[in-house]
Amino acid sequence: MKKIIAIICCQLSIFICQLSTVNCQLSTVQAQNPIVSHCYTADPAPMVFEDNDSLYVYCDEDMNVPGVNDFYYMERWRVYSTVDMVNWTDHGEAMPRTAFKWGCEGTCWASQCVKKGDYYYWYMCLSKPGDWRHYIGLGRSKKPSGPFKDVLKKPLFDTGEGGDIDPTVFIDDDGQAYLYWGNNKLRYAKLGSAMIYINTNIGKNGIVEVPLTAEAFGGVKVDDKVTGKDCYEEGPWLDKRGDNYYLMYAAGGVPEHISYSMSKSPEGPWEYKGVVMKQQDTGSFTNHSGMVHYQGKDYFFYHTGWAPKGGGGFNRSMAVEEMHFNADGTIKPITATRKGVKALRTMSPYLQQQAETLNAALGISVVGNEDTGVYVTGIHTGDSMRVANLDFGTEGAKSITLRVASANGKGTLVIRQDYAKGKVLARIPIAATGGDNVWAEQTFDLTAIPTGTHAIHFSFSGTDTQTLFNWDWWQFNEFTSEIEAIPLSTLNSQLSTFYTLQGIPVTNPTKGIYVKDGRKVVIP
Ligand code: FUB
């Protein structure tokens, strides 16, 4: 029954999402949700590490192919980071499923990462070949963005039952780490100090089953029937603010909403506190949440079916909202919005920026890992990318430098200001570099000068059906305040074209400021 409801919800959500696709093209600068649009991302687990300026989100990638694997099909986990809440850097293949030699194809489900000592520990769940149950595995890395390696070469434990999914890990102020997890049952264990074993001092084999009572979770579910106003389903998130411990979770059966319980101890007893995010038509019949404190604000992460192309219950997309607490520590209800959250700061176009740092993107993919290099590929005619909130200053940019690789040299990059149909800043033919992995830096003059704060929209066209080029990074180059003066009397000997600051060619320039040969000039 649960499966039938899930399938109906899924079909409905695909339909709803298709209807709303027209509203989620890249030109809609205001919409910050979903936070990643070039692939499907689910089960967000946000984390801020003490010694790092960025906010990281760990997630899994939905790769459902309709008609082939009409269910969750997930071959890898992904990591994203941000410093401004609107542009997100994709860290590529942080942990492919094949890194777990014991793992089964397509089963990479929810996860969470914490740091202890010199290492980042990423607890994730996946199946074994020929075994329908999920197990909790552990990836470890010295960098938050990986690549992560399988530390144990086997699951962390085996309860002999199903439902061992959705690990959440939390390190308390005294250094004790707790792992909670479970679908339709909720269990926890203390982790040993090395983070790679369960501390067997509590419960049977160190595992405690949390009683799913009405006091703790709002109601009780037996055989898919809920008695009471709510119930625990899956996707726990353990956290702490002040002296309050929070347990958020997907609740109420399918379709899911997010509810929470509170306690004065990470081991409970838990007291049901209500709904955080009610069930909404986001196109996804599951939801999965995480909370994080960053730059003085609290953020709530969840997932939807809001991807601009093909989004739905098995093709989910992460989203974020600001969250607020009442004086007694209870959580104010949160609504899922397309608008999402505001930028915390502007981004400099004059620093080298990774091509995979994106506000939104359609069609492209991001490959590689932090050891080999991460870059944008799969660039075809009609694809596009957007970066938000770039501060060009008062002088503006005169040119852009790109690090690209192209075998065919048949691609053109069009750079526009603000929108998909915004002012053209440059049309750049990307020359062949000698191969898709032969990288070259190329600098191009802009034909209009962006000043002030703008989004930049990159779109691609070309005469080849193959990848037009691969893209590593970009950097705009700033005008200096020295402006060359060109006396009117010498104009006839100046052969190049003059442009207005808005990029319009001027055949008979008079007094004023223009762009010529990629530089600002003044005719006094
Ligand atoms: O992503 C697969 C499963 O769907 C997760 O493990 C659950 O929390 C639900 O989001």
Image (cartoon, rainbow, N blue to C red):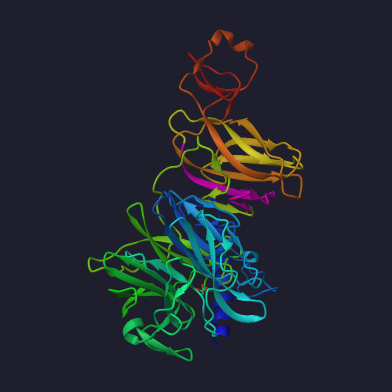
Residue 319 image position (x, y, % from top left): 47, 62
Which residue is rendered at x = 67% and y = 80% of the image?
130
452 to 18, vertically: above or below: above
- Left or right of 398? Residue 278 is left
Given the current orientation, which residue lies at the most extreme top position?
489
**For residue 108, above or below residue 162:** above
Q: Is residue 23 left or right of residue 212?
A: right
Please state the horizontal and vertical placement of residue 352, each as a whole percent of the image.
Answer: 54, 38
Vertically, is 20 above or below 430?
below
Q: Can residue 8 be seen in this view?
A: yes
* Residue at 49% from the left image edge and 53% from the top image edge: 81
Left or right: residue 119 versus residue 229 is right
Q: Is the magenta stretch mostly helix, strand or loop?
A: strand
Tell whether position 363 is magenta.
no
Is residue 389 highlighted in magenta?
yes
Q: At which x and y percent is residue 406?
A: 72, 42
Magenta segment, which residues? 368-391
Farthest left residue in view: 327
